[in-house]
Amino acid sequence: MLEQRSLGRQNGAAIVPLIAGLAVALGAGAVQAHSIAAPAFDAQIGVASEYVGKGLGKSAGDPSVNGSVEVSSGEFYASVFASTAKLSQGSDAEIVSVIGWRPEAAGYKFDLSVVNRDLPGTRAGVDANYWEYQADASRKLGPVNTRLRVNYTPDGFAATREAWWVEVQGTVSVGPKTKASVAIADRTADGGAEYAAWNVGVKHKLTEKLALDVRWYDTDSHALGENYDGRLVGALTFAL
């Protein structure tokens, strides 16, 4: 199984630059073919009972605060997200910067992006800044909005080298202001933890700008540490 995973990562590493190059070429063509739309700005702030990333607790069970801002023009966008954190290597925050493209084709909505993650406060000597390449494909099947996400990093946090995160998500409306969703994912890594993760929860719009999300997160690898244990997380977000 480890040999198969390693082979998959090596093959994927060769494919990722090709995909990135194709995305850039197609994106350039799209800009030339269509007039650039006026930029739009979106921002939000939030608070959560715990910060969770890729299925793992990342604030040591403590509450976290976060904020994000995005500027978009047509199918293209750039965004920055930041949250307080508390990781074993001393990190006290996580900053995620993204440049992406959201085209539509053949009934699918795509989101192709390049992501930079930075973890301020990490102790000296630990690699705390790294790049990811992410592709989402979404489509509505009956009442269910489905999404497939593939995330790849060639050189991850600390001692982690190549890593893959593959996630499938389904969302359904259970009321005019309420959506329920479930997701399951698998992480493989060279030099890092490998595990399966899942979450299930409900998001409800309390007002036009204020939303509450209550969600259960869990993994199949509790023996790896407390941050891999199951946890119920509540999060409030306010759109600015």
Image (cartoon, rainbow, N blue to C red):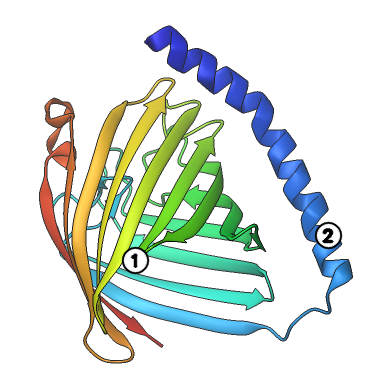
Judge left or right: residue 142 versus residue 162. Answer: left
Q: Amino acid at mark 2?
A: Ala
Say above or below: 21 vs 76: above
**Residue carrying label 2:** 28
Give the percent coordinates (x, y) of residue 180.
23, 65
Say few, some or many: other residues with alpha carbon within 10 Å of mark 2 (under 14 / 14 to 19 / 20 or more). Answer: few
Judge left or right: residue 152 versus residue 211. Answer: right
CB within 8 Å, label 2 to label 1: no
Secondary structure under badge 2? helix
Determine which quarter of the picture holds residue 30: bottom right
Say above or below: 11 vs 2: below
Q: Residue furthest bottom?
A: 208
Q: Which mark is residue 46?
A: none
**Residue carrying label 1:** 143
User: 28 or 174: nearer the eye?
Assistant: 174
Q: Amino acid at mark 1?
A: Pro
